[in-house]
């Protein structure tokens, strides 16, 4: 065994650019078509072409593959780039469910799905920028 052998990246294990593109396209198709992602869909503009490209470029690098996004736009600063989008728990949950469905449909291996789902959750949760209106206080007796 040579000391320079490297672990295959998540990008390689998934199947490279073709599979990442397929997953991203499925993600936006589902968002566009499925009523259960209607709230998430309303947060996007009418044309999803640029979002499809940008998420694809971003995920290639994020998974350890080519840095298409940073080559074009510099540091992703994802939270900052989402500040004009009101992201609460519902938007976060719809994003995560939609991505989960896309991963399953394009045949990402179950173990890889769990690994990615965990990272997606961390990132999506960190992007929340809305105070939630539901309070435990609403359940107090006498309300
Ligand atoms: C938490 C729920 C999320 C919502 C509601 C959301 C919504 C959006 C919207 C509406 C846009 C288009 C913005 C525009 O064109 O003006 C966008 C762009 C983008 N999103 Fe998200 N997103 C979420 C989570 C994520 C996550 C978890 C990732 C990465 C893992 C991600 C990666 C991106 C990227 C790379 C762009 C393009 C940014 C740019 O270059 O301006 N998003 N998102």
Image (spheres, rainbow, N blue to C red):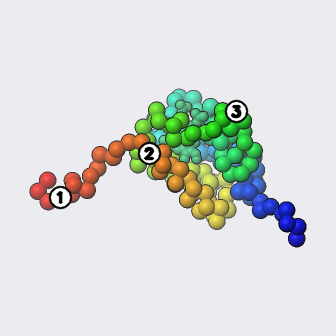
Kindly identify which numbered label has been placed on residue 128: 2
Q: Please provide percent x and percent y for residue 64.
A: 71, 51
Q: Please provide percent x and percent y for residue 45.
A: 52, 30
Residue at x-position 61% and y-position 61% = 115
Does the beta carbon of the residue at mark 2 sit less than 8 Å from ligand 1?
yes
Q: Please provide percent x and percent y for residue 36.
A: 46, 46
Q: Is mark 3 on a helix, strand or loop?
A: helix
Q: How crowded is mark 3: few (under 14 residues within 10 Å), some or many (20 or more)?
A: few
Residue at x-position 52% and y-position 54% = 122
Q: What element carries label 2?
A: loop
Q: Mark 3 points at which residue?
A: 72
| Mark 2 vs 1, N-terminal side | 2
Determine the CA span between mark 2 and mark 3.
25 Å
Against 140, is 76 above or below?
A: above
In terms of depth relative to the viewer, which is nearer, 129 or 51?
129
Q: Name the residue under label 1.
A: 140
Q: In this view, does 31 lie to the left or right of 131?
A: right
Q: Is residue 16 left or right of residue 76?
A: right
Q: In which quarter of the image is ligand 1?
A: top right
| Mark 2 vs 3, N-terminal side | 3
């Amino acid at each position: 065994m040579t000391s320079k052998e490297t672990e295959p990246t998540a990008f390689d294990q998934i199947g490279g650019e073709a599979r990442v593109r397929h997953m991203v396209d499925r993600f936006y198709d589902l968002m566009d078509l499925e009523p259960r992602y209607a709230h998430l869909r309303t947060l996007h503009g009418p044309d999803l072409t640029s979002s499809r490209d940008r998420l694809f470029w971003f995920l290639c690098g994020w998974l350890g593959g080519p840095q298409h996004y940073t080559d074009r736009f510099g540091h992703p600063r994802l939270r900052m780039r989402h500040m004009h989008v009101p992201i609460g728990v519902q938007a976060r949950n719809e994003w995560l469910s939609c991505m989960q469905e896309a991963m399953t449909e394009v045949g990402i291996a179950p173990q890889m799905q769990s690994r990615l789902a965990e990272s997606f959750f961390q990132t999506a949760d960190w992007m929340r920028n809305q105070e939630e209106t539901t309070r435990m206080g609403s359940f107090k007796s006498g309300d």
